[in-house]
Image (cartoon, rainbow, N blue to C red):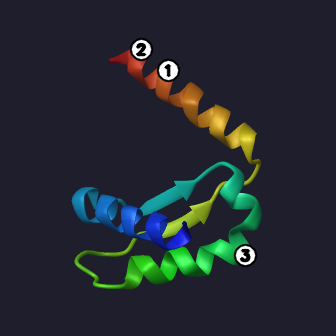
Amino acid sequence: MCKALGRGMHMIASALAPSEIVLVGDITTAWHLVGPVIETEMHKNRLVWVPKLRPARGGNQARLRSAVALVMNENQL
């Protein structure tokens, strides 16, 4: 699963070129185990700058904050 996630984030980074990707959710609780695998996948076959990966602290609270920010941003458009 971590390898697939790393490959998927590599595709996103190739298309959008973000400077940082913030991960939220349950995966952040095991970041010390899964982070190195994901980062290794992202560095394979480098096509673009590899963004910094940062796990959000706070698990579900971070997920909810992101959802609220998205809704507020959509309403401002």
**Residues marked 2 and 1 touching at CB (< 8 Å):** yes
Identify the amino acid type marked 3. Answer: His
Q: Quadrant of residue 30?
A: bottom right
Q: Which image quarter is the N terminus in?
A: bottom right
The disc, 3 or 2, on the residue closer to the chain's N-terminal end is: 3
Q: Position of residue 71 (x, y in %)?
A: 49, 21
Q: Residue at 54% of width from left, 56% of height from top? A: 22
Q: Which residue is mark 2?
A: 75
User: In terms of image quadrants, where is residue 33?
Assistant: bottom right
Decide which of 11, 70 is in the foreground and name it.
11
* In the image, residue 74 above or below residue 44: above
First in sequence: mark 3 vs mark 1 = 3
Amino acid carrying label 1: it is Met
Q: In the structure shown, which secondary structural element does the residue marked by tag 2 occupy?
A: helix
**In the image, farthest residue toward the top:** 75
Residue under numbered circle 1: 72
Q: Position of residue 28 (x, y in %)?
A: 69, 59
